[in-house]
Image (spheres, grey):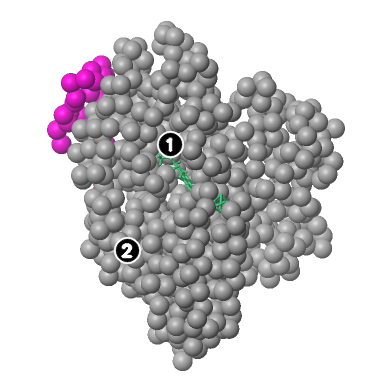
Amino acid sequence: MTTPISAKIPTPANSYEAGKPVMTDLNGQTLLCLRTLAEENPASLETYIKLGGYSALKRIVSEKTKATDIITQVKTSGLRGRGGAGFPTGLKWSFMPRYFDGVKYLVCNSDEGEPGTFKDRDIIRYNPHQLIEGMAIAAYTLGARVGYNYIHGEIWQDYEIFEAALHEAKAAGYLGENLFGTNFCFDLYAVHGYGAYICGEETALIESIEGKKGQPRFKPPFPASYGVFGKPTNVNNTESYASIPWIMQHGGEAFAALGVPNSGGTKLFSVSGHVGKPGNYEVKMGTPFTELLEMAGGVWKGRKLKAVIPGGPSTPVMPASAIMGATMDYEGLSKARSSLGAGSMIVMDETTCMVKALHRLSYFFYEESCGQCTPCREGTGWVYRVITRIVNGKGKMEDLDLLTDVSNNISGRTICALGEAAATPVLSFIKHFRPEFEYYIQHGKSMVESQIDAVVDGKAEPK
Amino acid sequence: MLSPQAIEKIDYELTKYPADQRIAAVMSALRIVQTERGWLSKESITDVSQYLRIPEIAALEVAGFYNMYDLSPVGQYKITVCTNISCMLRDSDEIVDHLKAKLGVGFNEVTADGKFCLKEGECMGACGGAPLMTVNNHTMHEFLTPEKVDAILEELK
Ligand SMILES: Cc1cc2nc3c(=O)[nH]c(=O)nc-3n(C[C@H](O)[C@H](O)[C@H](O)COP(=O)(O)O)c2cc1C
Ligand code: SF4
Ligand code: FES
């Protein structure tokens, strides 16, 4: 691949420059955010530097590259927020007030806790320095003096890896005061959650950093004007920041060229559930679903694919027939009537009972609603109780319309998007698998249970 | 009274925030004290709030909001199994059943000898390693099988 380096961004003065993007191929992946993965000691500073790490930061800071030029590159790259909403990162950066009398903050959202999402964890434990460099470049661009990376509490061992990487980076002169002999200063800290999905929502996360309950704030004001400690704050996802060093090394156009129109670059897909090799796969945007499924070892135990939730439970479930022809990018999945979300593919084979799967998801949203808004608090509880009734064999046909109604009434009437996220699985599961719900209500048991005996699994007794 | 070790750790966390924002360290402070004492008693909450010079209710609210804080005793080892969708698809229910049978307790119960407590967890952001569980919040065990669970329990005994 040839790399058009944009005229505005000077070529880095090291061996990884012009036309030689560092992309490691590991079993057909295109490793960019996880580019250290093929190395022996992927998380070490030494490895990262060997692959050209911190060269973009050093060049930008030493040459005093103009912030507007960096933002232009990020816009050109087509990078869209990897936290789920897909908001263009360059555009978001342009909202930060340029001049502000006081400290501005930079926040990284590593709180992934949406079921099926576990990609940021691998960036943190296998390539922490790329995230640090990306945040430092963002801090330089946006004039942020202090940064926080908020890490999901349950991946504690990875939190400690990141803390260690921060100390390493600071000792090596990539964080702290007067970096590279200039007046650029940036302090970056790791902070942790402790078991609350809602803290992934950016304003809840900000509240949590401030030492409060993680309850989302009304927007506006947006974090860009009123964020951490009431100061202008930029919030991005881990993978968004981790993409930045590569973009600044090779230019926005090179990044855009890796993907497809409107979806630049590579994307980490967390593939979980019924596949042979669950895990993260970093591939080019626009990769066909079938290719990704194959990389992940195909459907578990050679069974038949039934459905896929392509981007985490807040994206509509897709029946096998709908996803088989889809490509993994923003437009590819929206054309197939779902959405890329955070790239959290939950694969379900023919042995999955959709009623029970929805039951578990409805419990999750009920349990994790922060309770501030009545439609969300009451609605998620109501939905959970009705599905529980169905699962217990006491459902009524009217329940399906009731579930649809209640879910429609949560959406759009809440402070944050959790309400809508809770409604999406209910609406899409019933839409695509209605006969299965009806069967359960009529027979008081799962349609799948009666079919499963036929499946060679060893779990069910033969009839 | 906080131990000198706890104070040292909390002081480190305080360096991450502006001097007038001691409250921001409450998440870490509660975590540090809980790790040391096993769970968060009323007295622990008081200790944390006094050290941070914040209202006790502020610390209590935080401790009550986040699932990984324990406001009642959880035995020596708290085992939390994720049962959310990706883990469920990888048969986390078998792991739960196995643990229940082996320990003789249900969710949120502590074994008679005070050693183990079983909890149901939400997605831990590690679904690729399903089924999985944490021990005392900070140690994760992935790709569980009943045999692997037995080995882990044996080591904790
Ligand atoms: C309920 C809820 C949970 C969320 N969880 C996460 C999360 O775990 N990680 C994340 O990056 N964004 C999450 N988001 C989106 C964030 O609010 C925010 O849009 C994102 O961090 C911005 O970063 P990006 O533009 O780089 O994607 C969540 C949003 C909602 C409503
Ligand atoms: S929508 Fe739900 S989670 Fe979001 S603020 Fe309202 S009650 Fe809380
Ligand atoms: S669903 Fe169990 S860790 Fe995510």
Task: Name the amino acid, label 2.
Answer: Gly
Percent across and percent down for residue A140 are 40, 20
Q: Which of marks 2 and 1 is nearer the N terminus?
A: 1
Residue B50 in view, yes or no: yes
Instruction: Identify the residue under disc 2.
Output: A298
Is A364 drawn above or below residue A450 in the view shown? Answer: above
Is B26 drawn above or below residue A112 in the view shown? Answer: above
**Mark 2 belongs to chain:** A
Instruction: Identify the residue under disc 1.
Output: A236
- Bounds of the magenta segment: A1-29
Using the image, tell me which numbered label, if any, was put on residue A149.
Answer: none
What residue is drawn where x is 22% and y is 23%?
A17
Is A92 contained in the magenta span? no
Is A402 drawn above or below residue B138 in the view shown? Answer: below
What residue is drawn where x is 50% and y is 35%?
A221
Percent across and percent down for residue B59 are 74, 39
The answer to whether mark 1 is within 8 Å of ligand 1 is yes
Quadrant containing the N terminus of chain A in the rendered view: top left
Local SS, label 2: loop
Occupied quadrant, residue A332? bottom left
What residue is drawn where x is 47% and y is 18%?
A100
Q: Observer-nearest residue: A47 or A284?
A: A284
Percent across and percent down for residue A462 are 46, 88
Local SS, label 1: strand
Q: Do labels 2 and 1 share a chain?
A: yes
Q: Observer-nearest residue: A182 or A80?
A: A80
Percent across and percent down for residue A246 are 30, 31
